[in-house]
Image: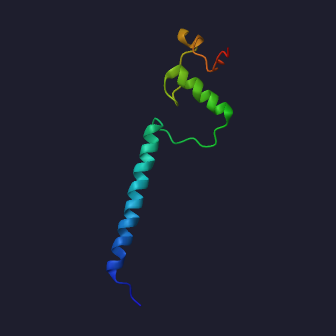
């Protein structure tokens, strides 16, 4: 039994819109991540290094090329202080 071509138009539209939205979603994720692909399976060490890089450079994926840390980095601690309970 033949399929009328009018039934394939919505199928083509839905498939096309899924493809276009997937393409733009991937480009959005890449642009948010500074043009690099997303990182999966990050362990605790990787997260600590990402936090350190963010405190050094101001970006999540950026790395500094200086051999010594800036002077402001000595007071910029990753450790949260416990609030005093009175």
**42 sits left or right of 5 in the view:** right
Q: How many marks?
A: 0
**16 sits left or right of 83 in the view:** left
Residue 10's x, y, as percent? 35, 71
The correct choice, above or below, for 83 with respect to 1 in the image is above
- Colouring used for the render: rainbow
Direction left: furthest residue: 6
Residue 53 visible in rendering: yes
Q: Quadrant of residue 49?
A: top right
**13 sits left or right of 45 in the view:** left
Q: Residue at x 53, y 42 (%)?
A: 38
Residue 84's x, y, as percent? 66, 15
The correct choice, above or below, for 20 with respect to 11 in the image is above
Q: Residue at x 64, y 42 (%)?
A: 41
Residue 22's x, y, as percent? 43, 54
Residue 64 visible in rendering: no
**78 sits left or right of 20 in the view:** right
Direction top: furthest residue: 71
The correct choice, above or below, for 74 with respect to 8 in the image is above
Q: Quadrant of residue 86?
A: top right
Direction front: furthest residue: 86
The quadrant in which the N terminus is found is bottom left
Q: Residue at x 67, y 31 (%)?
A: 45
Residue 62's x, y, as percent? 51, 27
């Amino acid at each position: 039994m033949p399929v009328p071509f009018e039934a394939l138009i919505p199928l083509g539209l839905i498939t096309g819109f899924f493809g276009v939205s997937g393409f733009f979603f991937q480009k959005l994720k890449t642009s948010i991540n500074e043009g690099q692909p997303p990182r999966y399976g990050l362990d605790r060490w990787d997260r600590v290094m990402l936090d350190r890089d963010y405190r050094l450079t101001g970006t999540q994926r950026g790395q500094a090329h200086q051999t010594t840390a800036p002077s402001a980095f000595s007071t910029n601690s990753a450790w949260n202080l416990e609030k005093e309970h009175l």
